[in-house]
């Protein structure tokens, strides 16, 4: 029974790992979007001269990380003249600690050390395989096939020595020089370094009553983005649109001349609901050999897409609802999700 | 009376006292079996800890290893992750990252600490006692994606009032399901009472059927009170009418008394939960508590704390007020 398999494997559910996110990504072109965010980001990182500074803007759950990961996966797959070394900063330090540029640069340096003295923390093989439109493979199987290229081994050995002997990242007055030295090593090894500040909400404080804590946003941009944007790296910053209301953000973005790429909103006027395409892709990737309409009827897909627009493009929450609706349909003995299943799950979660 | 005033050892000593709630158990356990994370909400005394223990037992029976972690003893996010790592080590041994520990800034320390949680197979992590909002936000917000990558399913039990940070982006997305423990209905209350009382005790307690609609701890405490009264009618017991006597002093006094009874613990006029429930300023709350104390409806004790200066006064309903 296809719906049971879909439910048990969480096929419709929010993808949470890098591999899953890459594997189920549906490109903007496939969705019929004229503004192709993935192509724009790819061009900026692969075609244009470094260093590039790019702003990815999207609400929580809209797909900022998925967009970045898909493009990163495409980058590692492509046979480019210059390979990229990509460091994704995802663990934000407490905003109150990011009170100086030195603290931010120190955080980057320490992350490089944690990653084995390498300016990269992506699992290239996992992403490469996931992006190759392959069916399910476990990340573990793929990870074991990963291998480091000679230039990487060489530069990371040099960095390790520098961290140990020159105490990289330990002396606040030298921290900028240390980071510049690291970047020089990466570039001289033949790589193009890309630093991604993914999900900047992790670097700011939750404000009271759901309001934005402007001070921590200012800290992040003034001490973080502004300074990192002065270094010889490509810088990609993923941001919630409400940060745009903070003056310091506008100031830094203008100063660095960061083009803005918006995470695209699913088209609302397509003949077939775009959300159906997203669910269908997930079924294909998990090897569910069934037509979409046999497991979810059109009214249910439309209901989900209405919720997507109602929830300000929060695709993550809508996918969770789709998973819940599968459970609800199975619970009433049906092998097909109907609109009433979606409504029942919504009623139960509000 | 066989009831315990503590979380039950559902698979051992207290197996016979556990009130089965299959629907609630399934809402917690099913997502964990599917490697999804659950935020479990329950008021004090609702049975969160007991339910987590039951979940651990159910998971183990289905071949899924589970660990119980008391988050109350963690001083910060790194401390919490260390507790989890220690519990994982005890249950399934070391992970591939080993136990090497290096110093570094908080953020990278957390990154390393999170990666150390990696094990060959997922283990359900059942976390209880987390009351520090910052720790919760650091771990399930700032480290959200790292925890997702590590792959263990989590169930975290907190009081609704402590859940704000865990339901704020980016932490909100960590939870595939939010499950709230509802008070016991009439039938559940009756089943609970029959589990913990013998026939004679049950008949004594049965007079006070208004205890239905409460959480297990309140039901048990009400039963204890009924039993300690013996055959004496409830209306003649000193203290039973504290609320009524408070209402003679004024509406605010009655409200404060009701909240103090609801909290079930001694509080000062600085207590944030009390102030939040009352919606009053601290000076006003202090004034009302003092009035209740002057009239003998509250009793006081000094607060034990590491603060400098005069200890604060803690108030609780007076179980033996002067007769009217």
Image: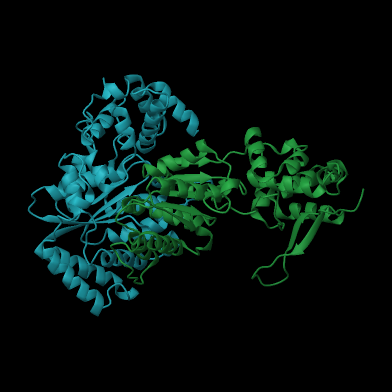
Q: Residue furthest front?
A: B199
Q: In screen coordinates, is A331 left or right of A66?
A: right
Q: In screen coordinates, is A334 left or right of A292?
A: right
User: Which of the colour schemes (rainbow, by chain, secondary structure, one colour) is used?
Assistant: by chain
Chain depicted in green = B
Q: Residue furthest bottom?
A: A165
Can residue A27 be seen here? The reply is: no
Q: How many marks?
A: 0
Can residue B200 be seen here? The reply is: yes
User: Who's the residue at 13% across and 59% down the image?
Assistant: A147
Residue B228, x across and y down, in percent:
79, 50
Residue A27, x across and y down, in percent:
21, 36
Residue B292, x across and y down, in percent:
82, 52
From this view, report whether residue A39 is shown above or below residue A341.
Answer: below
Q: Nearer the viewer, residue A350 or A4?
A: A4
User: Who's the residue at 68% across and 43% down the image?
Assistant: B219
Q: Nearer the viewer, residue B315 or A184?
A: B315
User: Who's the residue at 26% across and 48% down the image?
Assistant: A18
Image quadrant of residue A85?
bottom left
User: Who's the residue at 34% across and 23% down the image?
Assistant: A336
Residue B224, x across and y down, in percent:
74, 48
From this view, report whether residue B267 is shown above or below residue A59.
Answer: below
Image quadrant of residue B117?
bottom left
Chain depicted in cyan = A
Q: In screen coordinates, is B62 left or right of A121?
A: right
Q: In screen coordinates, is B61 left or right of A123?
A: right
Q: Quadrant of the N terminus of chain A?
A: top left
Q: Nearer the viewer, residue A303 or A167?
A: A303
From this view, report whether residue A190 is shown above or below residue B56.
Answer: below
């Amino acid at each position: 029974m296809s719906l049971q398999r879909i439910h048990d494997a969480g096929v419709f559910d929010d993808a949470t790992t890098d591999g899953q996110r890459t594997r189920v990504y549906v490109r903007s072109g496939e969705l019929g979007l004229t503004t192709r965010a993935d192509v724009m980001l790819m061009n900026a990182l692969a075609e244009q001269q470094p260093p590039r500074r790019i702003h990815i803007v999207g609400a929580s759950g809209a797909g900022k990380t998925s967009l970045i990961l898909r493009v990163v996966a495409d980058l590692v797959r492509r046979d480019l003249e210059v390979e990229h070394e990509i460091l994704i900063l995802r663990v934000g330090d407490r905003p109150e600690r990011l009170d100086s540029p030195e603290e931010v640069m120190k955080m980057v340096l320490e992350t490089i050390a944690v990653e084995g003295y390498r300016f990269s923390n992506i699992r290239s093989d996992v992403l490469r395989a996931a992006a190759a439109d392959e069916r399910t493979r476990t990340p573990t199987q793929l990870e074991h096939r990963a291998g480091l290229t000679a230039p990487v081994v060489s530069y990371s050995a040099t960095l390790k020595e520098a961290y140990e002997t020159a105490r990289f990242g330990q002396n606040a007055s030298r921290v900028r020089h240390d980071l510049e030295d690291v970047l020089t090593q990466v570039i001289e090894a033949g790589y193009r370094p890309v630093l991604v500040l993914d999900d900047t909400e992790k670097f700011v404080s939750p404000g009271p009553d759901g309001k934005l804590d402007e001070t921590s946003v200012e800290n992040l941009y003034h001490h973080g983005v502004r300074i990192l944007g002065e270094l010889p790296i490509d810088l990609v910053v993923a941001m919630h649109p409400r940060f745009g209301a903070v003056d310091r953000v506008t100031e830094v973005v203008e100063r660095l001349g960061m083009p803005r790429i918006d995470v695209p909103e699913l088209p609302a006027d397509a003949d077939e609901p775009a959300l159906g395409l997203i669910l269908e892709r997930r079924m294909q990737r998990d090897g569910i050999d069934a037509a979409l309409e046999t497991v979810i009827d059109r009214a249910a897909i439309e209901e989900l897409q209405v919720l997507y627009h109602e929830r300000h493009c929060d695709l993550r929450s809508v996918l969770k609802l789709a998973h819940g609706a599968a459970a609800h349909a199975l619970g009433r003995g049906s092998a097909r999700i109907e609109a009433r299943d979606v409504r029942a799950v919504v009623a139960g979660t509000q | 009376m066989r009831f315990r005033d503590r979380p039950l050892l559902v698979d051992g000593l207290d197996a016979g006292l556990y009130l089965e709630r299959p629907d609630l158990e399934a809402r917690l356990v099913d997502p964990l079996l599917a490697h999804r994370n659950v935020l479990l909400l329950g008021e004090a005394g609702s049975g969160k800890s007991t339910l987590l223990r039951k979940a651990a037992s159910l998971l183990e029976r289905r071949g899924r290893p589970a660990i119980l972690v008391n988050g109350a003893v963690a001083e910060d996010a790194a401390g919490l992750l260390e507790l989890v790592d220690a519990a994982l080590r005890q249950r399934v041994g070391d992970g591939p990252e080993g136990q090497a520990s290096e110093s570094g800034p908080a953020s990278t320390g957390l990154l390393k600490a999170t990666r150390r949680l990696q094990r060959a197979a997922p283990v359900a992590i059942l976390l209880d006692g987390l009351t520090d909002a910052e720790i919760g936000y650091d771990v399930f917000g700032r480290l959200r994606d790292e925890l997702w990558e590590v792959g263990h399913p989590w169930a975290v039990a907190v009081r609704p009032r402590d859940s704000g940070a865990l339901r704020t982006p980016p932490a909100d997305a960590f939870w595939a399901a939010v499950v709230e423990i509802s008070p016991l209905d009439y039938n559940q209350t009756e089943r609970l009472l029959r589990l913990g009382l013998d026939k004679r005790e049950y008949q004594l307690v049965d007079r006070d059927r208004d205890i239905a609609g409460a959480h297990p701890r309140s039901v048990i405490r009400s039963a204890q009170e009924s039993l300690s009264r013996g055959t004496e009618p409830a209306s003649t017991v000193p203290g039973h009418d504290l609320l009524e006597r408070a209402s003679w002093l004024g509406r605010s006094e009655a409200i404060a008394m009701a909240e103090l009874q609801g909290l079930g613990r001694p509080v000062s006029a600085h207590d944030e939960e009390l102030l939040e429930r009352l919606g009053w300023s601290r000076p006003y709350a202090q004034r009302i508590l003092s009035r209740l104390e002057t009239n003998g409806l509250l009793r006081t004790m000094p607060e034990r704390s590491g603060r400098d200066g005069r200890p604060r006064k803690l108030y609780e309903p007076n179980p033996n007020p002067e007769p009217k």
